[in-house]
C-alpha cells in the first residue's frame, strides 16, 4: 500500500500535472493546486474528449484514475478523509516541491478546493438556521381526511396476505425515537411489512403506499442535526414561515418523522409541527438538495395512500421584504434598497457600479451574515460597525484590510476566505486563515508537509 507522505506515491500524478502545466511548474511564484478524498477529487488536468461517435469512457482517463487511485489508497491506509495539495517548482533542477495540507479542527472542509474551508471561531457553534426550533402554532389539528380505519382497511385490501409489525416492534421504535408514532403511521406499519426482506415482487411498497417505505427499524426523526448543513451554506439561509405556509421553513424539526423516500433521495415524513396553514400529521417531503424547509405532499397519510394526493396545495405568498438580500447587477440595486429591520443575510455579488457603502445597514438588529465579492465594498473597515455579525465571507484583500485596521468583528462564530481556486495560492490563504484564527485563540488551520523530488 502506498504511503501518503512518500513522494513516490505522488510521482505519477505529478508527472501528469507537469505535462499539463509545464509553464507554471517551471516558473518561480506559480503553483498548481487540488484536493483528493476517497469519494471525490478536484485535480486540474485537462478533459480528454472521447473519440467521435462514442461516449466518454474510463479508459480515456485511465492514467489519471490510476494516479489518483494510488493517493486514494494511501488516504484509506492513513485513515484520512482527504488531502489538499499545492505543487510548485523546486530550486533543484527538474525538481518539484509538493505541499500536502491536512486541515485541523478549526476548519470545516471546503467543497472540492485546496483552499481551507470555513474557519470555526467558536467550539460547537452552528449557523443560526440550524439552531432554530419549531414555533408553536396554536390551533393546528389533524386534517379531516385523516382516517386510521380507512387507511388500514385500504392497505389490507391492497395487501391481503401481508403481515405487518407487531405492537412490540412498534414500541421498540417508539422507545428509540423517544416519541410515540402518529396514529396513521402506526396503522401503516401494522399492515405493511416493515422490512425489505418481507417484500416480494407482488408487494412493492411504492405502488401500495406511494413512496419507497423505510424499514420500521430505520424510521428516524429529521431534526436539524440529521440534515448536515455546512456553515458556508447554512449561514446564507434564513428560516421564514408566513401565515400562508403549511410547513415551517426549518432545517429540521423534532416533529418530522421520516418513513419514506421518493426514490431520488428526498425523504418523506409525517409532520407534527406544522405551519399556520398546515395540519398535524400532514405528509411532507424534505429535499436532499436544499438546506432549509420542506414541501407539503398531502394533508394526511390517508390522503396520500388512499386518495393518491401527492401535490400539496397551492400557496399564494404575501409580499414581504426578503430576509436574505442579494445585491448585484441583476437583482437588488444597492445596499439601501436591501435594508430593513428584519434583514438577516446581505450578499454583495457581481457589481458593475461604484463600490458600496454599508452605512444603510448599520445598527440592523438581525443582520448576522455578510458575504462580499472582490471590490464591492467601498471601505471594508465599515464592517466593524455591523455589531451582530456571526458569519463573514470576504476575499483575501478585504480580510487583509480588516486585519491591518484591527477591525475584524470580535463576535464572529465562523468566517470564510473567498479565494480564487487556482489564481490564489492556498498556502497564502492558509497564512491569512491562521492570522484570523489567532485573533480568536483557535488552533492553526492546517498541518503542512513539504516533499521534494524529481518526477523523472
Image (tube, rainbow, N blue to C red):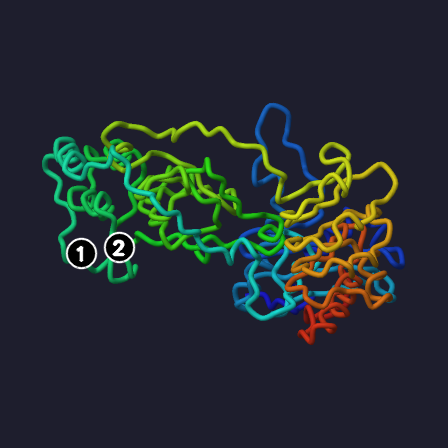
Residues marked 2 and 1 touching at CB (< 8 Å): yes
The answer, for residue 10, to whether it is visible in the render is no
- Residue at the left extreme of this rendering: 161
Tell me the quarter of the image containing the C terminus.
bottom right
**Could you tell me which quadrant the N terminus lies in?**
bottom right
Q: Which residue is mark 2?
A: 217
| Residue for point 67% across, 42% down | 325
Q: For the residue labelled by badge 2, is the local secondary structure a helix, a strand or a loop?
A: helix
223 is higher (above) or lower (below) than 408: above
Q: Which residue is mark 1?
A: 169
Q: Residue furthest top?
A: 53
Say left or right for 186 vs 107.
left
Determine crowd level at label 1: few under 14, some 14-19, many 20+ residues with C-alpha closer than 10 A: some
- Is 394 above or below relative to 336? below
Where residue 25 appears, as percent x and y from the top left, is 83, 55
SS state under label 1:
helix
Q: Position of residue 60 (x, y in %)?
A: 62, 38
Camera-side residue: 158 or 364?
364
Residue plotted at (26% across, 35% down): 209
Amino acid at each position: 500500500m502506498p504511503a501518503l507522505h512518500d513522494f513516490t506515491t505522488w510521482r505519477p500524478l505529478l508527472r501528469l500535472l507537469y505535462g499539463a502545466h509545464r509553464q507554471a511548474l517551471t516558473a518561480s511564484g506559480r503553483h498548481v493546486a487540488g484536493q483528493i478524498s476517497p469519494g471525490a477529487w478536484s485535480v486540474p488536468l485537462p478533459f480528454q474528449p472521447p473519440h467521435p461517435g462514442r461516449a466518454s469512457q474510463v479508459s480515456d482517463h485511465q492514467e489519471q484514475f490510476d494516479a489518483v487511485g494510488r493517493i486514494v489508497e494511501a488516504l484509506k491506509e492513513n485513515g484520512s478523509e482527504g488531502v489538499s495539495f499545492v505543487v510548485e517548482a523546486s530550486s533543484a533542477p527538474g525538481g518539484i516541491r509538493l505541499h500536502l495540507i491536512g486541515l485541523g479542527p478549526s476548519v470545516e472542509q471546503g467543497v472540492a478546493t485546496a483552499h481551507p474551508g470555513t474557519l470555526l471561531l467558536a467550539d460547537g457553534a452552528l449557523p443560526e438556521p440550524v439552531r432554530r426550533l419549531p414555533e408553536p402554532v396554536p390551533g393546528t389539528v389533524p386534517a379531516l381526511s385523516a382516517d386510521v380505519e380507512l387507511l388500514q382497511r385500504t392497505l389490507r385490501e391492497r395487501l391481503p396476505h401481508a403481515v405487518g409489525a407487531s405492537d412490540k416492534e412498534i414500541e421498540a421504535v417508539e422507545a428509540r425515537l423517544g416519541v410515540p408514532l402518529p396514529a396513521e403511521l402506526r396503522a401503516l406499519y401494522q399492515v405493511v411489512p416493515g422490512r425489505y426482506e418481507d417484500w416480494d415482487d407482488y408487494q412493492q411498497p411504492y405502488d401500495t403506499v406511494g413512496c419507497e417505505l423505510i424499514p420500521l427499524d430505520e424510521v428516524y426523526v429529521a431534526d436539524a442535526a440529521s440534515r448536515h448543513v455546512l456553515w458556508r451554506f447554512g449561514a446564507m439561509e434564513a428560516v421564514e414561515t408566513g401565515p400562508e405556509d403549511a410547513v415551517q421553513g426549518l432545517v429540521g424539526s423534532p416533529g418530522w418523522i421520516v418513513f419514506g423516500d421518493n426514490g431520488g433521495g428526498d425523504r418523506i415524513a409525517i409532520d407534527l409541527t406544522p405551519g399556520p396553514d398546515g395540519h398535524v400529521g400532514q405528509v411532507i417531503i424534505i429535499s436532499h438538495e436544499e438546506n432549509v424547509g420542506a414541501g407539503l405532499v398531502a394533508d394526511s397519510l390517508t390522503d396520500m395512500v388512499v386518495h393518491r394526493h401527492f401535490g400539496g396545495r397551492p400557496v399564494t405568498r404575501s409580499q414581504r421584504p426578503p430576509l436574505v438580500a442579494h445585491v448585484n447587477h441583476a437583482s437588488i440595486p444597492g445596499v439601501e434598497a436591501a435594508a430593513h429591520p428584519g434583514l438577516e443575510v446581505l450578499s454583495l455579488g457581481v457589481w458593475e457600479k461604484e463600490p458600496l457603502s454599508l452605512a444603510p445597514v448599520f445598527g440592523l438588529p438581525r443582520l448576522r451574515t455578510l458575504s462580499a465579492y472582490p471590490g464591492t465594498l467601498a471601505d471594508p473597515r465599515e464592517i466593524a460597525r455591523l455589531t451582530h455579525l456571526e458569519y463573514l465571507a470576504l476575499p483575501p484583500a478585504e480580510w487583509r484590510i480588516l486585519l491591518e485596521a484591527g477591525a475584524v468583528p470580535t463576535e464572529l462564530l465562523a468566517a470564510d476566505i473567498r479565494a480564487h481556486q487556482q489564481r490564489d495560492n492556498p498556502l497564502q490563504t492558509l497564512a491569512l486563515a491562521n492570522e484570523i484564527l489567532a485573533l480568536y485563540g483557535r488552533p492553526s488551520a492546517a498541518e503542512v508537509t513539504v516533499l521534494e523530488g524529481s518526477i523523472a
